[in-house]
Image: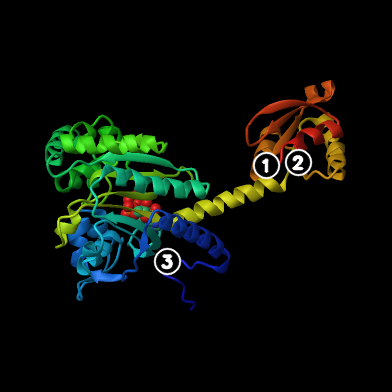
Amino acid sequence: MKITALNGFKDILPDEIKQWRIVENIATDILERFNFSEIRLPILEKTDLFARSIGESTDIVEKEMYTFVEKQVTMRPEATASLVRAYIQHGLYVQKPVQKLFTIGPMFRHERPQKGRLRQFTQLSAEVLGSASAKIDAELIGMASYFFKTLNLDVSLELNSLGCPDCRPAFRQKLLAFIEDKYDHLCDDCKRRSTTNPLRVLDCKVESCRKEVADAPSIQESLCDVCADHFTTVQKSLDQLQIPYSLNKFMVRGLDYYVRTTFEFLTSDLGAQAAVCAGGRYDGLIEQLGGPKLPGIGFAMGLERLVLLLQQQQEEQEKTCETDLFVAGFGEGPSSFTFELVHALRLSSLRVAQDVEGKGLKSQMKQADKIGARFVLIIGDDELDSGVGVLRNMQTKEETKVSLTVEAVLEQVNNSTC
Ligand code: ATP
Ligand code: MG
């Protein structure tokens, strides 16, 4: 019997390495420009480290950790706790008042594997320890945003504030009162969460729960003066750096240590696995893990998701460059005409595809889309009679009229390169 890799554990084969290197090289270059130093951390830590930092009632600690029970050790599910542990253990705060550190490596979570969701995955974590300034929040978010821009990835930024131990309890009460009426309509997870960690009800992915909490109170309106000021400065600083964002009152993040600023960068190209980078401020964490009372903020990026996006982007580009034109003739006359036209266009160097099975226009458009044709030339009876076809640019969806001669079609298609 063949032995295969465990479910959710993936080999990265030689032909994928190019994208990994692109991501890692661009990232390290940008991190250094923003004055970050690399730190490398162990994969195995005491279980207690994660239970105390991430929180007992979070998905990660409740059900996703790989723990050796007898030994009380756990394969790290994320890097912030380990990094803060190392920061305290080696007294890094003595060396520099503000430490900017990053680390890249595998994380382990026992989740249901699917596209963009693995049991061993790679995170790039960047953390700034020792500064409470809202400008640092904007700088860090700005760095991530610049990274996505450099990779040419289309992501959107969502922002929220989770308040602090001074103002969050009052919001929690407000939310509990709101949830009370909805309780019977919530999913089982949310029913449980409403007692252990009610804020998590806000980011439940179940559609019916989303509907129930749609008009839940917003934490942004319950912030104390200090948190409200902080949040305003973060937004102003992002505006100053011209980084677009939207506010999302439902984003609460699945880890207990966050306070004030939280953010996520999202893509619409990976289905449910939308978050490519997530982070926030954790001002109480260093002290909670036995260190000095110093603030911190950081983010983690899932590199597999970024590599997937780069691969999709490349496939898209390759696809769109392979076929210049799909000629869609429908009806007997047009089909016969296009058969000849396609041949002539090919002889004039265009890469042209057509349907010779007599399919309808809709099916032909689908085919054109599937092979990634840059243009489709549509010819029905009317077009044939008038000698003017419809040329559709498949990227811009723009339609123009074109004379049904080889020269005219060539000119229009060649005018737009891929
Ligand atoms: P998700 O909502 O997708 O479960 P998360 O909130 O659990 O993400 P974090 O714990 O904040 O994510 O981790 C930061 C980033 O690490 C995520 O935005 C994602 O890009 C990546 N990530 C998290 N879990 C996985 C996983 N199982 N497989 C691949 N990447 C992951
Ligand atoms: Mg998760």
**Disc 1, SS:** helix
**Disc 2, SS:** loop
Q: Are marks 2 and 1 in contact (CB under 8 Å)?
A: yes
What is the crowding at mark 1: few (fewer than 14 residues within 10 Å), some, or many (at least 20)? some
Q: Quadrant of the C terminus?
A: top right
* x 27%, y 57%: residue: 60
What is the crowding at mark 2: few (fewer than 14 residues within 10 Å), some, or many (at least 20)? many
Mark 2 highlights which residue?
355
Say which of marks 3 and 1 sits in front.
Answer: 3
Real-space CA distance between mark 3 and mark 2, rounded to the nearest whole angstrom? 42 Å
**Disc 3, SS:** loop
The amino acid beneath tag 2 is Asp
Along the line of sight, which residue is nearer the eye, 96 or 389?
96
Real-space CA distance between mark 3 and mark 1, rounded to the nearest whole angstrom? 35 Å
Along the line of sight, which residue is nearer the eye, 256 or 186?
256
User: Residue 35, percent across and down?
Assistant: 37, 56
User: Residue 2, percent across and down?
Assistant: 49, 77
The amino acid beneath tag 3 is Phe
User: Residue 140, percent across and down?
Assistant: 35, 48
Say whether residue 413 is visible: yes
364 up-or-down from 125: above or below: above
* x 26%, y 37%: residue: 231
Side of 319 where 338 appears, left or right: right
Mark 2 and mark 1 lie on one chain; the one further toward the N terminus is: 2
Mark 3 highlights which residue?
9
Mark 1 highlights which residue?
367
Callout 2: CB less than 8 Å from ligand 1: no
